[in-house]
């Protein structure tokens, strides 16, 4: 086994090493590449090396972006080599380049070529982030691409195939999902959060995206093909039609409890005696939650890929019933991949809580076995720092966070284990997790979204959060903590 290279060894030095191994630069007389091209190659590698070493990732990305225009073959093979090369910290850059520029055929060729065992996380990141690129293929090419993904031995690649079908809104292709279907996870009592649950959520999410209804079983899903799709129903009619009647919400039973189908959720109410949920209440909850859910899906998509998932249950409970459905009475919400429980409270605080809990649902429907700090950090970061970090030097001072920065935020967080609890320590851990994920999203990294996806995919693949952080974010955990502190104090 060879030792990993230092994370910040120049990316171009790495590309040069590859080029030496495979090209006429190795000293053999080059009879194919004109000298001007060789000079251009060297200049590009020099520019890449300089920018990478100085942490100027915008220039690294711009240089690679430009290479796709001038020398597409070089850009494709370099990106492919980076995506699975020894320099782990450069892999997200290679993946992001492929997602941004490679054709669907080239992306599929990369997935076929990357090792399903050695580069499992890289394949998953590439497949999930490439869903929009696959879905934008013309209809003639789609069946082969989707078939390729759905036949993969890795459930997460099959899940990506389901999301390609959802994103393309192709009702014909949805039939390919029928043999994969088991029970709709949104109707299951509990969420295991394993790869099968993730696959089922993505498969049922595709039917929901295409038809706008939620089949419970393979039989119900198969019956949808005789119904008009959402797109057909929303197409403007040639003849003026009368205003559609106001949608009436009818409760359906899930394990003996009434649920109303609203945008993005199936909502139910748990109140103490004397009060029960009704369609008006369900519509009021829809008003409160629909846009929050959509905003969180949009904020998460650059990191997670598009989020066509089976809509979860949403249980609104009053204080007397909340602990029995929420499980954790210290916070006003709780979530698993297929259910959110919310404590009934003021609309603004319920809206903020539903944003946080939606992120847990999206996270759970994408990755298994995630550490608590990363789950809470993502939920806080995406819900509160949606477009940019709310952490500034002033916020650090105001919250008295200097000790946390000096002692090391990540070093503390990777040890955050155990169940939810009350108290100031827990609140500070949430805040630290928020700051940490803000740093991963907005800090000085090349391809931050693909990097964070790959980080989560590696953790889901049973690699430790600590060592993966070190490999992807540079140096030891102390180095990462120092870089985070510098970033936070200079904003
Ligand atoms: Zn949470």
Image (cartoon, rainbow, N blue to C red):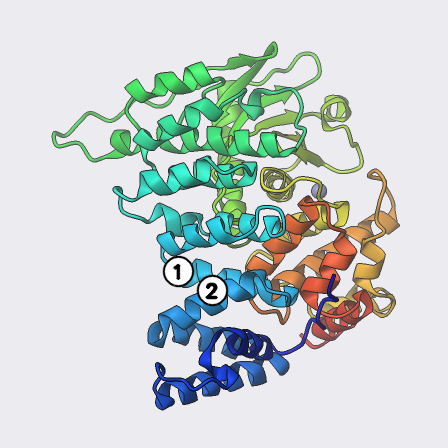
Where in the figure is residue 447, as x and y percent of width and height?
55, 65
Where in the figure is residue 188, as x and y percent of width and height?
61, 20
- The front one of 384 and 337 is 337
Q: Are marks 2 and 1 in contact (CB under 8 Å)?
A: yes
* Quadrant of the displayed image that contains ligand 1: top right
- The front one of 335 and 4 is 4
Residue at image location 63% in from the left, 38% down from the top: 364
In this view, 373 is above or below 74: above
In this view, 214 is above or below 47: above
Q: Secondary structure at mark 1?
A: loop
Disc 1 target residue: 102
What is the residue that sits farthest to the top in this orientation?
256
The answer to whether residue 158 shows anywhere in this view is yes
- The front one of 56 and 72 is 72
Q: CA distance from mark 2 to mark 1?
A: 8 Å
**Is the residue marked 2 within 8 Å of ligand 1, measured from its CB?**
no
Q: Left or right? Give the position of 224 relative to 99.
A: left
In this view, 184 is above or below 385: above
In this view, 9 is above or below 154: below
The answer to whether residue 168 shows anywhere in this view is no
Q: Quadrant of the N terminus?
A: bottom right
Where in the figure is residue 94, as x and y percent of width and height?
52, 64
| Res 222 quadrant in image | top left
- The front one of 371 and 137 is 137
Q: Left or right? Give the position of 241 relative to 213.
A: left
Q: Quadrant of the C terminus?
A: bottom right
Disc 2 target residue: 97
Q: Left or right? Give the position of 465 relative to 259.
A: right
Where in the figure is residue 96, as x and y percent of width and height?
50, 61
């Amino acid at each position: 086994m060879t030792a990993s290279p230092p994370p910040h060894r120049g990316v171009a030095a790495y590309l040069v090493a590859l080029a030496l191994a495979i090209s006429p630069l190795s000293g053999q007389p080059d009879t194919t590449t004109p000298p001007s091209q060789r000079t251009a190659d060297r200049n590009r590698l020099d520019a890449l090396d300089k920018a990478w070493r100085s942490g100027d990732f915008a220039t690294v990305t711009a240089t690679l972006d430009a290479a796709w225009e001038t020398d597409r073959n070089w850009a494709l093979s370099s990106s492919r080599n980076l995506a699975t090369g020894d320099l782990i910290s450069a892999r997200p850059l290679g993946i992001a380049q492929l997602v941004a520029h490679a054709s669907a055929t080239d992306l599929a060729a990369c997935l076929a070529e990357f090792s399903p065992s050695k580069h499992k996380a890289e394949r998953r990141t590439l497949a999930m982030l490439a869903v929009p690129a696959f879905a934008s293929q013309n209809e003639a090419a789609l069946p082969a691409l989707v078939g390729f993904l759905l036949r993969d031995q890795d459930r997460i690649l099959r899940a990506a195939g389901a999301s390609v079908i959802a994103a393309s809104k192709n009702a014909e292709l949805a039939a390919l999902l029928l043999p994969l279907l088991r029970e709709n996870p949104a109707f299951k009592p509990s969420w295991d959060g394993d790869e099968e649950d993730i696959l089922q959520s993505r498969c049922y999410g595709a039917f929901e995206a295409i038809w706008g209804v939620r089949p419970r079983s393979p039989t119900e899903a198969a019956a949808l093909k005789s119904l008009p799709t959402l797109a057909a129903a929303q197409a403007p009619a040639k003849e003026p039609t009368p205003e559609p009647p106001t949608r009436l919400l009818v409760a359906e039973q899930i394990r003996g409890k009434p649920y109303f189908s609203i945008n993005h959720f199936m909502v139910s109410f748990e109140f103490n005696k004397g009060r029960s949920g009704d369609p008006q209440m369900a519509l009021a909850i829809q008003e409160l939650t629909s846009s929050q859910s959509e905003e969180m899906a949009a904020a998460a998509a650059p990191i997670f890929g598009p989020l066509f998932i089976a809509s979860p249950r949403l249980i609104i409970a009053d204080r007397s019933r909340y602990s029995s459905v929420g499980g954790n009475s210290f916070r006003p919400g709780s979530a698993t991949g297929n259910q959110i429980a919310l404590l009934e409270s003021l609309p603004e605080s319920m809206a903020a809580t539903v944003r946080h809990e939606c992120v847990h649902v999206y996270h759970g429907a994408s990755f298994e076995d995630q550490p608590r700090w990363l789950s809470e950090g993502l939920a806080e970061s995406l819900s509160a720092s949606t477009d940019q970090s709310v952490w500034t030097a002033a916020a650090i001072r105001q919250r008295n966070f200097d000790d946390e920065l000096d002692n090391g935020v990540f070093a503390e967080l990777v040890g955050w284990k155990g169940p939810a609890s009350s108290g100031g320590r827990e609140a500070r851990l949430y805040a630290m997790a928020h700051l940490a994920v803000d740093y991963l999203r907005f800090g000085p990294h090349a391809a931050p979204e693909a990097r964070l996806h790959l980080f989560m995919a590696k953790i889901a693949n049973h690699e430790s959060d600590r060592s993966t952080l070190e490999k992807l974010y540079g140096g030891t955990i102390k180095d990462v903590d120092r870089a985070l502190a510098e970033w936070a104090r200079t904003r």
